[in-house]
Image: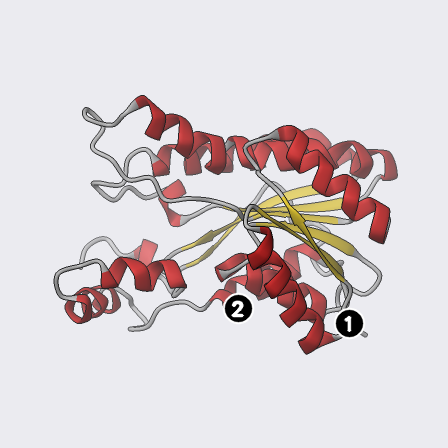
Amino acid sequence: MKRLAGKAALVTGAGRGIGAAIALAFAREGAAVVLAELDLDRAQRTAAQIEAQTGGRVLAVQTDVTQSASVQHAVSEGERVFGALDVLVNNAGINVFCDPLTMADADWRRCFAVDLDGVWNGCRAVLPGMVERGAGSIVNIASTHAFKIIPGCFPYPVAKHGVIGLTRALGIEYAPRNVRVNAIAPGYIETQLTHDWWNAQPDPAAAQQATLDLQPMKRMGRPEEVAMTAVFLASDEAPFINASCITIDGGRSVLYHD
């Protein structure tokens, strides 16, 4: 039997990268999936690919996670088409890396609007239904930046630290109602954004090799490796995992020095 059979899930930022991998994995495991994505064309293309590969039920909804009304609309559309939502994955996020003393106010607000407020907007939209039904799983995609600091990446780690705090607080708050809230902290995952960053460097090949050299396993993580952990946390196989964070970084964050 498929691990998410009979469940309905909403994944934010599901048009590409880790979000798309999670949506695909959920559909393969039997879930009906709402792809909540700012770029509707991208979401529709991804939804069509997932439907073709899995035969699953998928729905693309244009969603701006910085706007609570937009997130609530996505939840309402998912409930209209698939019924009650059993799972939420708050995956949408952006990289904002600045010098603290020269950073514009707009950059600070943009980082927190997507990377922290967006997570809260998702949680706030699904929690009433989950609490009422006495069941639900929320998975927040955090980052190893949530507990490790890389110089030059401010204020992104500040927002991701907040995601862990939000995960723990909500997990404890709603544990008596059987609603679990957990996080996943990916390290270096090979997505298109990673390749875009390498290609923007003076020597892309050297930049890629430098990243690989940092990894204990001498390779990058893959989006589907994050996705299968999300499947586990969303499934009935993890009923006593709550207010926790699972790190997926090949051991990188354990290293004291290189």
Q: Label 2 amino acid?
A: Glu
25 with respect to 57 (left or right): left
Q: Residue 154's quadrant in the figure?
A: top left
Q: Position of residue 151 (x, y in %)?
A: 21, 41
Q: Secondary structure at mark 1?
A: loop
Residue 171 seen in this snapshot: no
221 with respect to 135 (left or right): left
Task: Please say if 13 is above or below 70.
Answer: below
The number of callouts visible is 2
Q: Residue 158's quadrant in the figure?
A: top left
By what rule are the colours in the image chosen? secondary structure
Q: Position of residue 249 (x, y in %)?
A: 39, 60
Q: Are marks 1 and 2 in contact (CB under 8 Å)?
A: no
- Check disc 1: other Cα within 10 Å, few if <14, some if 14-19, many if 20+: few
**Pick the front one: 219 or 100:** 100
47 with respect to 101 (left or right): right
Q: Position of residue 190 (x, y in %)?
A: 38, 66
* Residue for badge 2: 224
Residue at 71% of width from left, 34% of height from top?
A: 72
As measured in the structure, the alpha-carbon distance from the residue carrying label 1 to the one carrying label 2 is: 17 Å
Residue at 48% of width from left, 36% of height from top?
A: 114
Q: Residue 32's quadrant in the figure?
A: bottom right
Q: Label 1 amino acid?
A: Lys
Disc 1 or 2, which lies upstream in sequence?
A: 1
Numbered badge on residue 249: none
- In the orientation shown, which residue stands out farthest toward the bottom? 53
Which quadrant is the C terminus positioned in? bottom left
Residue at 78% of width from left, 64% of height from top?
A: 57
Q: Secondary structure at mark 2?
A: helix
Residue at 79% of width from left, 39% of height from top?
A: 130
* Residue for badge 1: 2
